[in-house]
Amino acid sequence: MNWDKSDQLYEKSKKYIPGGVNSPVRAFQAVGRSPVFIERAKGSKLYDVDGNEYIDYVCSWGPCILGHGHIGVIDAVKKACDNGLTFGAPTENEYILANLIHELMPSMELTRLVSSGTEAVMSAIRVARGYTNRDMIIKFRGCYHGHSDGLLVKAGSGALTQSVPDSKGVPYDYTKNTLVADYNDVKSVEDLFERYADKIAAIIVEPVAANMGVVLPEEGFLQFLRDITTKHDSLLIFDEVITGFRLGLGGAQEYYGITPDLTTLGKVIGGGMPVGAYGGRKEIMEMVAPIGPVYQAGTLSGNPIATAAGIETLKTLKNTPDVYTRIEFQTNKLASAIKDRFENQVCVNRIGSLMSTFFTTKKVIDFDSALTSDTNKYTNYFGYLLEKGIYLAPSQYEAMFISYAHSEEDIEKTCEIIRNCTCV
Ligand SMILES: *Cc1c(COP(=O)(O)O)cnc(C)c1O
């Protein structure tokens, strides 16, 4: 494969954009390569500026669950454009989308639309703090909730010390109210509640962790989080930016039968346009301005083009009964091919259409076990697949995404290439 044009664009971009990219993982740094510049995409395929074609297993990091350039979604966007791009005043689309979200995810009694997952999480936490009159929150190591200051934290040294910033530029004062626990570790959460119980506004969790690679909640873990927050009058926030409309129409909360107090959404609900949402129990969401004292706003929130894409995406998911069974079936086939090829050398974590291949012999159940992966092996695996026209996430610690547009043929071809991999 030839990447001359991509390489040239990368050099030019680096002159005016930090690292040549507008989101760090796109730079392919973790896999030691230069990024591929994409020109267009259709269905399951990406086409780069050099004319190379790839079967895409990133799907824009989740949103493109129906595949790229879905005709219904594109038409809805074009139609909406004809009426103007933004009004800064309420529109019917916002009602339709909020109503649809409530129908599919009944815990979302009131929903506020924003423009990204980061914004959704940041706002949900503000509401949780406003509602409980408490400042502290608990997050889990390895879970990602966007790039707001208070969530870019890592655990301090010593089990019960408070966390410290995980990025330069984040003041210590902005992270001192963020406590860090270990995913799937009940005791780490109990210890924090023992020490800070009446100060903890909320636990925020990815109900299925998908930002340290895919890590499933162990039996009873989510129920435990529900119980301990209820017991201490704290709120439970499910960050379903990835799992929402991905694990099923009702997200992880339906899949596991656990109802959070607040939920954050993103990715799929925009169908490829920038949309995020947060919402939940009515009395909690009534804290939000203009009816409540918690301020949150957005010039382009509920944008008519973005909501048109979101509505069409959710409606299509709702009206296409085999979406979730089919993408799960396809993902399973890929998982089998990987297990056949790398028997005993990898841990494959999969749920629904979310999957990660960790190059480790350990069972991956949390951040520490995820870190036992041999990232050099992943780098080789990634490079081999890219050369063969298979586009995986350029990092070991990301999920693989499959869309409804992936055909039998795409999957068979990918399985065959994986089975023939001699690079690892
Ligand atoms: C992607 C992601 C976010 C951040 O969403 P952006 O739209 O990138 O700001 C938050 N939480 C989770 C679980 C995510 O996967």
Image (tube, rainbow, N blue to C red):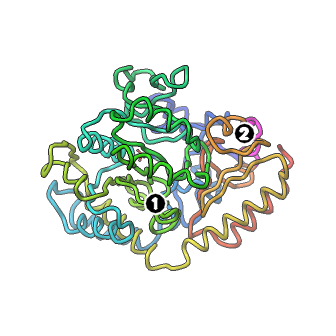
Q: Tell me the magenta residue range.
A: 373-384
From the image, give the main secondary structure of the stretch colored magenta. helix
Secondary structure of the residue carrying tag 2 is helix
Q: Is residue 262 visible?
A: yes
Which residue does the numbered mark 2 point to in the structure image? 379
Tell me what residue is drawn at x 59 percent, y 64 percent: 44
The type of residue carrying mark 2 is Thr
Instruction: Kindly state the secondary structure of the residue where label 1 is placed.
Output: loop
Q: Nearer the viewer, residue 211 or 116?
A: 211
Q: Where is residue 297 in the image (x, y as percent from the top left)?
A: 21, 46
Q: In this view, does 364 lie above or below 107?
A: above
Q: Earlier in the sequence, mark 1 or mark 2?
A: 1
Classify residue 129 as left or right of residue 360.
left
Q: In this view, does 239 lie to the left or right of 361?
A: left
Which of 27/378 is in front?
378
- For the image, the number of numbered tags is 2
Q: Distance between the residues labelled 1 and 2?
A: 37 Å
Q: Which of the two marks, 1 or 2, is nearer to us in this view?
A: 1
Residue 377 lies in magenta, yes or no? Answer: yes
User: Is residue 17 among what the camera can see?
Assistant: no
